[in-house]
Amino acid sequence: MNSPISRRTVAVSLLAGAAALGTPGAAFATSAPSPAEDLPSRRRHRHQQPTIVLIHGAFADASSWSAVVERLQRQGHHALAPALPLRGLASDAAYIRSVLDGVPGPIVLVGHSYGGAVISVAAADAPQVKALVYIAAFVPDVGESALELTGKYPGSTLAQATSTQYYPLPGGGEGEELIIRQELFREQFAAGVPATTAQVMAVGQRPIALTALQEKATAAAWKKLPSWYLVATEDRNIPPAAEQWMAERAHAHTARVRAPHAVAVSDPAPVTELILRATRSAC
């Protein structure tokens, strides 16, 4: 268990393997607002269309949301898909929280895969976040890691499809990161996606630090926010049974799609529809 190979195999086999926020009451002002100016502006703010922020997970990048973003934009929605560092849960969540703090108005926050763990932490005590949407994603409670969650159920084949790479740490030494071997990427991650598209995805995939998957969550925003979940029933990274269990525990509005882990690429229409349902219901 102390060798790099056995550590990686055990960790990866585990890996791949709410009350909605109410609208706060208006605060009393020292002087009455102008009916001609302040009241209309408050009404516009109250009904301001939310920004949909999309967080990718491991072995992907922000382009994995492209087809979903196109659909959202065609319907007049504003979307944002930042790049996730994939270096550690706390640091990744802090980075995404800094992105959220720069977004005016309400937010619907969406996470895929490991991105689900990130949004669960990043949205804690973030008043502008009105709903969480999990797309084949981790939904950890406080003290849980992505590896622990997936270990509840068998079915992942990710361990056989990944290899370990090493990268320099800021304080010296090396860290381990995982990447899916390109020749196995489509079968493992994107089955059903056109071969040429999957090949491009494999080349541009983002490796994830092993420690990010081992790190325990320090917050669980889904306990206070309304949540939606899409289960990918053909997922080979996170067992579908684990996805269903996490969705039920979070009391999430749940949809099921026969799709691989990269469901936003293979089946963007139902992913978009679930996001829009969350947007209509929570905002």
Image (cartoon, helix red, strand yellow):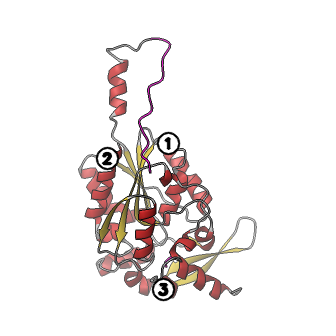
Residue at the image position 31 percent from the left and 79 percent from the top: 196
Q: Which of 164 and 8 is in front in this view?
A: 8
**Which circle marks residue 161 in the picture?**
3
Amino acid type of the residue that numbered disc 3 sits on in the rendered structure: Ala
User: What's the CA distance linking mark 2 and mark 3?
Assistant: 39 Å
Q: Is residue 192 visible?
A: yes
- Residue that carries the numbered disc 1 in the rendered image: 102
SS at mark 1 in the image: loop
Q: Are marks 2 and 3 in contact (CB under 8 Å)?
A: no
- The answer to whether 262 appears left or right of 151 in the picture is left
Confirm whether the magenta stretch covers residue 228: no
Q: Which class describes the residues within 10 Å of circle 3: few (<14), some (14-19), or many (20+)?
A: some
Residue 104 point in image, percent of width and height: 44, 38
* Quarter of the rendering occupied by the C terminus: top left
Pick the front one: 32 or 86 = 32
Taking the image as drawn, is residue 112 in sight?
A: no
Residue 62, located in which quarter of the rendered image? Answer: bottom left
Q: Number of labelled discs?
A: 3
Main secondary-structure element of the magenta-colored stretch = loop
Q: Distance between the residues labelled 2 and 1?
A: 24 Å
Residue 106's place in the image compared with 223, above or below, is above
- For label 2, the residue is 281
* Quadrant location, the N terminus: bottom right
Left or right of 31? Residue 146 is right
C-beta proximity under 8 Å, tags 2 and 1: no
- Which amino acid type corresponds to the residue marked 2 in the rendered image? Ser
Alpha-carbon neighbours of circle 2 within 10 Å: few (<14), some, or many (≥20)? few
Tell me which segment is drawn in magenta.
Answer: 16-31
- Per the image, label 2 sits on a secondary structure element best described as helix
* Among numbered discs 2 and 3, the one appearing first in the sequence: 3
